[in-house]
Amino acid sequence: MANPTPKSKTATGSGIPRINVSIVEDDDWLRADLAQKISAAPGFACLSSYASAEEALKKLPGDAPGVVIMDINLPGMNGIECVRRLKEADPKICILILTVYEETDLIFAALKAGANGYLLKRSIPGELFGAITFAHQGGSPMTSSVAHQVVRYFSKPPAGNDQMEGLSTREKEILNLIIQGHAYKTIADQLSISIGTVNMFISRIYKKMHVHSRGEATAKMQQK
């Protein structure tokens, strides 16, 4: 169901660029409420909203949103599978999971599918707009309790997990910051190194782990 009052896809009346958002959520009230909040917020526009993954897969590519907000528990195809298929069609699409579920297996499954961030519904509206902006800028926002689960997982890897044993102390530090959702610039500032150096370390980490992305690295750690 398309948002009844879509705003400009490019800019606000003041000339400030908008972040264009599409929503995939089966709860009618929540979908409408999110659309209204996003449309009313300065610097944001709700382009469209859909009640199912199947409808979203047909129409989202034509919307070309800057950020997609995706529920997990959808009728028919679930949100994680929808993320995977949308990413296969367009690897650059930015998708935030917004769900009530905070089980570790679902968190990692969503990241493995290609989700750029993972938010809990209880976190809205306080965290929502900051998370949308952060994701649009290349970060990977997570509700704090979700981020803590991920960090704990990497801080205390299961017995026999050799994925981090080949990494240097600095590489482990950067990997943990990536998993927490920090953008490269934030990592560079926090560690007092250049973005180029961050990129170099990330390339080394991915090469040692035989992966090509944040999601693949996270999923590989989870499998051990």
Image (cartoon, rainbow, N blue to C red):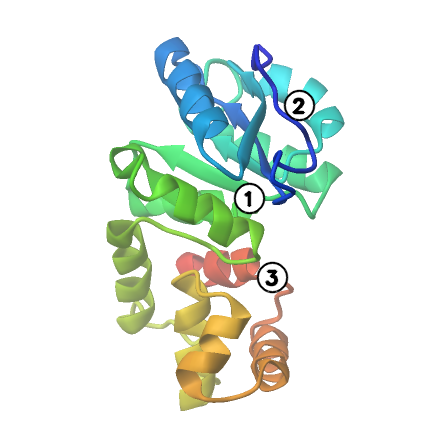
* Picture coordinates of residue 178, whole percent (x, y): 46, 67
**Badge 1: few (under 14), some or many (20 or more) residues near its Cα, within 10 Å?**
many
The amino acid type, in three-letter code, at marker 2 is: Leu
Residue at disc 3, secondary structure = loop
Instruction: Say above or below: 45 vs 33.
Output: below
Instruction: Quadrant for the C terminus, please.
Output: bottom left
Spatial CA distance of label 3 from label 1 is 11 Å
Front one among 15 and 32: 15
Q: CA distance from mark 2 to mark 1?
A: 15 Å
- Name the amino acid type tagged 3: Ser
Residue 153 point in image, percent of width and height: 30, 63
Q: Is residue 169 above or below residue 216?
A: below
- Please state the horizontal and vertical placement of residue 64, each as a whole percent of the image: 71, 33
Tally the marks: 3
Q: Left or right: where does residue 161 sit relative to residue 94? A: left
Q: Label 2, on which residue?
A: 57
Where is mark 1, residue-wise?
A: 113
Q: Tell us which disc is closer to us: 2 or 1.
A: 2
Question: Is tag 2's residue or tag 3's residue first in the polypeptide sequence?
Answer: 2
Q: Quadrant of the N terminus?
A: top right
Q: Is residue 124 visible?
A: yes
> In the rendered image, which quarter is residue 89 located in?
top right
Q: Amino acid at mark 1?
A: Ala
> Element type at marker 1?
helix
| Left or right, residue 180 beside residue 132 | left
Front in this rendered view, residue 156 or 102: 102
Name which residue lies at 51% across and 58% down.
139
Q: Reading the chain from its start, which is encountered first: label 3 or label 1?
A: 1
From the image, tell me which residue sits under label 3: 213
Residue 163 visible (yes or no):
no
